[in-house]
Image: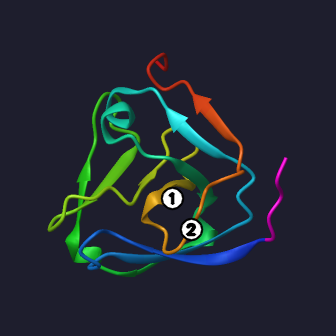
Amino acid sequence: MMTMEEKTYTGSCHCGQITFHITTDFPELTTCDCSICRKKNALMVKVHESKFKLISGQEQLTEYQFHTHTAHHYFCRTCGIYPFHRKRVTPDFYGINVYCLDNFDPTGIPVRATIGAGMD
């Protein structure tokens, strides 16, 4: 299994209005089989809120909630890209769409499939 050193990465939506930093060592990446994750097809890394910083674009974020209205899924109002969400089971963590990270290659990082569709 590949282990990485913890470091800070910059990410953004497609149009660049939403920018953020995360700090992680990428212990794993996750996919989810819930209805929204299947459709957005994101590959995520989980980071604690203390390791996430929104740099710009707060006013460009739009939020979507469904089912229990516990998770907070954020999208860019301009380009529609999903950069991150507040997690349902662990609300002090963000799920970050690694495809929004600048110059990041997920090759070699273990991917774990999570079960979202079966959650109550």
The residue tagged 2 is: 104
Secondary structure of the residue carrying numbered label 1: helix
Q: CA distance from mark 1 to mark 2?
A: 7 Å
* In the image, residue 120 above or below residue 22: above
Q: Residue at x 61, y 56 (%)?
A: 106
**Contact (Cβ within 8 Å) of mark 1 with mark 2:** yes
Q: Is residue 92 magenta?
A: no
* In the image, residue 36 above or below residue 45: above
Q: Residue at x 65, y 53 (%)?
A: 107
Q: Residue at x 62, y 59 (%)?
A: 47
Nearer the observer, 11 or 74: 11
Tell me where the magenta segment starts and ends, as one range: 1-5
> Is tag 1's residue or tag 2's residue first in the polypeptide sequence?
1
Give the residue at the far left of this rendering: 78
Asked which quadrant contains residue 111, the reply is top right
User: Residue 84, position in %: x, y?
Assistant: 42, 57
User: Residue 41, position in %: x, y?
Assistant: 38, 40
The residue tagged 1 is: 98
User: Residue 24, position in %: x, y?
Assistant: 69, 66
Amino acid at dot 1: Val
* Magenta span dominant secondary structure: loop
Residue 49 appears left or right of 61: right
* In the image, residue 45 above or below residue 110: below
